[in-house]
Image: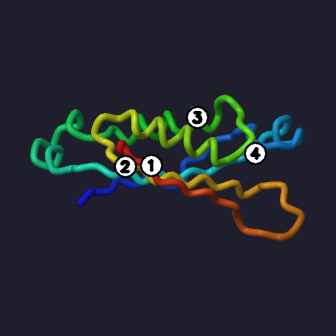
């Protein structure tokens, strides 16, 4: 069984998308990340060195959102997953990228892509 640490509602302004307007004006992206890891060592030691520093991970996730533009939120989600899996204790990650201002010609609440990646 893998323990879970969740970061929900991370926000950043990005310039991702396939349309010129998205690339020029940008928009807010919201990211939820669920880290799968064994927290037993950290629970016993009570030491940050034995777990994932979720503050640092949150900062890096937002840096990806605000960084180099990509066409698809699928690509953005993969880049975020790669950042999370770079943490030695993270064994698995679920990443959901929300694009609430997507250029869709009908009323909607949100557009999301969710991916799950693991070390293996």
Question: In screen coordinates, is 38 left or right of 98?
Answer: left
Verify CB contact (< 8 Å) between mark 1 and mark 2.
yes
Q: Residues within 10 Å of mark 4 (few under 14, many from 20)?
A: many
Residue appearing at x 33%, y 43% in the figure: 90
Using the numbered discs, state the Cα–Cα distance from disc 4 to disc 2 in whole angstroms.
28 Å
Q: Is residue 59 above or below residue 101?
A: above
The residue where tag 4 is placed is: 27
Question: In screen coordinates, is 49 left or right of 112?
Answer: left
Using the numbered discs, state the Cα–Cα distance from disc 3 to disc 1 in whole angstroms.
17 Å
The residue where tag 1 is placed is: 117
Q: Residues within 10 Å of mark 3 (few under 14, many from 20)?
A: some
The residue where tag 3 is placed is: 64
Q: Nearer the viewer, residue 116 or 65?
A: 116
The earlier-in-sequence mark between 1 and 2 is 2
The earlier-in-sequence mark between 3 and 1 is 3
The earlier-in-sequence mark between 1 and 4 is 4
Using the numbered discs, state the Cα–Cα distance from disc 1 to disc 2 in whole angstroms.
6 Å
Residue appearing at x 33%, y 38% in the figure: 53
């Amino acid at each position: 069984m893998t323990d879970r640490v969740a970061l929900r509602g991370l926000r950043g302004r990005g310039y991702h998308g396939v349309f010129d307007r998205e690339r020029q004006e940008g928009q807010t992206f919201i990211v939820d990340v669920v880290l799968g890891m064994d927290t037993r060592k950290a629970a016993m030691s009570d030491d940050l060195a034995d777990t994932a520093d979720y503050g640092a991970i949150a900062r890096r996730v937002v840096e990806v959102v605000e960084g180099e533009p990509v066409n698809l939120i699928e690509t953005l989600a993969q880049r975020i997953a790669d950042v999370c899996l770079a943490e030695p204790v993270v064994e698995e990650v679920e990443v959901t990228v929300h694009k609430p201002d997507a250029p869709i010609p009908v009323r909607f609440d949100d557009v999301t892509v969710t991916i799950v990646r693991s070390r293996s």
